[in-house]
């Protein structure tokens, strides 16, 4: 059965996202897609469906949503407060959202980007092979209160699954590969870059995140004369004031600031999900280490469905308690052998 989801109250930045559209860099269009691709894979595992399906990305705050048919949902990424008709529901879990019930999603408790998945995905018409909104390129737009989204056909009815997420919401170490201009920076500057505690600037967005820090900047002589060339998500540009700027999913495709390094794709979500108070530290790795890290990350994503466990609910929150078979095989005690 298909239906629609209506946004009764929209948070500040709601967009439909999938894994993005590759192959258009030469035409001036970056990949885009979800800021946290791991959250897409986690949602797909919880729903038992393809990670290619589109979900709703919520930056910092969710909103209020209602569907016109019973709909399976899952909540992943940055944990936000969530309720269905006033009853709290758990994050990183698949639930049933009854037709007409109000799903309320509040502010992020950890991280920045939360994701609302629906059974069957959001059925938008693909553009250049993707349903992802790319705000900076004008593909799609930020969703507003009153907007509706079509829901695709769901081939399952399984809910009540829990998945412990990969830890990426509290800052930590971010692995970096040397880039084309890394050798422009002296060993002292590179060492200082690795030893500095950085904090994500509050003005970060889907295009990029400035890193705030104490101490002198990381300027390199002649850095502002670098010719403009291709750049990709994860590149760390050193801007004119010496501050690092990590490029994110919707970054531009060319740039002239020198790059001290490039964040591994598997670690980019850690930057995207870091709240302003979280500490980030960058560490250079070799190509061999990077390949192995990406291999392990891919293997972990493929194994997500095997890590699902049943959600254990508090009976006090189960208003339909009598409909559950809480104890199986109980006998009265006076039956014949």
Image (cartoon, rainbow, N blue to C red):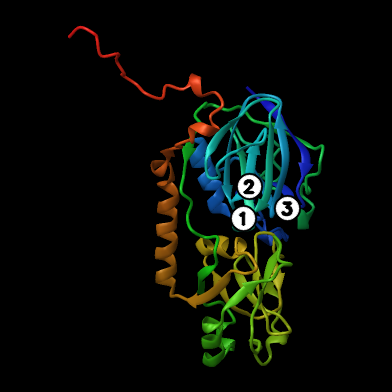
Position of the N terminus, as image quadrant, is top right
Q: Residue at x 77, y 52 (%)?
A: 12
Q: Please tell me whether mark 1 sits on a helix, a strand or a loop.
A: loop
Tell me if mark 1 has few (under 14), some (14-19) or many (20+) residues whose alpha carbon lies within 10 angstroms of its own. Answer: some
Where does residue 222 sit, x and y in percent of width and height?
69, 91
Task: State left or right for residue 271 relative to residue 305.
Answer: right
Q: Which residue is mark 1?
A: 109
Asked if the residue at tag 1 contacts the one at tag 2, i.e. Cβ–Cβ closer than 8 Å, the answer is yes
Q: Nearer the viewer, residue 1 or 280?
A: 280
Q: Nearer the viewer, residue 117 or 163?
A: 163
Q: In the rendering, which numbered label is found on residue 81?
A: 2
Residue 7 falls in image quadrant? top right
Tell me if mark 2 has few (under 14), some (14-19) or many (20+) residues whose alpha carbon lies within 10 angstroms of its own. Answer: some
Q: Please tell me whether mark 3 sits on a helix, a strand or a loop.
A: loop
Residue 224 falls in image quadrant? bottom right
Disc 2 to disc 1, how far (Cα)? 7 Å
Task: State left or right for residue 269 relative to residue 145.
Answer: left
Disc 3 to disc 2, how far (Cα)? 27 Å
């Amino acid at each position: 059965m298909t239906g629609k989801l209506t946004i009764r109250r929209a948070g500040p930045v709601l967009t439909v996202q999938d894994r993005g559209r590759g192959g258009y860099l030469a035409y001036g269009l970056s990949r885009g897609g979800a800021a946290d691709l791991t959250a897409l894979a986690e949602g797909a595992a919880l729903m038992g469906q393809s990670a290619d399906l589109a979900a709703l990305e919520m930056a910092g705050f969710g909103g209020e949503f209602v569907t016109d048919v019973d709909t399976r949902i899952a909540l992943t990424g940055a944990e936000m407060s969530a309720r269905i008709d006033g009853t709290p529901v758990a994050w990183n879990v698949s639930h049933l959202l009854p037709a007409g019930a109000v799903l309320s999603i509040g502010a992020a408790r950890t991280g920045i980007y939360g994701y609302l998945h629906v059974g069957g995905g959001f059925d938008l018409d693909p553009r250049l092979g993707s349903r992802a909104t790319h705000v900076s390129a004008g593909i799609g737009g930020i969703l507003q209160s009153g907007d509706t989204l079509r829901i695709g056909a769901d081939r399952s009815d399984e809910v009540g699954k829990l998945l412990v997420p990969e830890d990426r919401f509290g800052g930590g170490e971010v692995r970096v590969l040397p880039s084309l201009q890394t050798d422009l920076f002296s060993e002292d500057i590179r060492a200082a870059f690795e030893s500095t505690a950085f904090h994500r600037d509050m003005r970060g967005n889907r295009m990029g995140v400035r890193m705030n820090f104490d101490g002198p900047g990381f300027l390199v002589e002649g850095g502002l004369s670098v010719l403009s060339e291709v750049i990709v998500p994860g590149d760390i540009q050193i801007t004119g004031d010496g501050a690092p700027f990590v490029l994110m999913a919707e970054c531009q495709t060319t740039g002239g600031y020198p790059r001290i390094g490039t964040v591994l794709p598997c670690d980019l979500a850690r930057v995207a999900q870091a709240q302003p108070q979280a500490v980030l530290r960058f560490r250079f790795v070799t190509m061999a280490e990077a390949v192995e890290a990406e291999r392990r990350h891919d293997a972990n994503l493929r194994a997500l469905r095997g890590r699902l466990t049943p959600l254990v609910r508090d009976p006090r929150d189960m208003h339909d308690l009598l409909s559950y078979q809480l104890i199986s095989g109980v006998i009265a005690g006076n039956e014949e052998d």
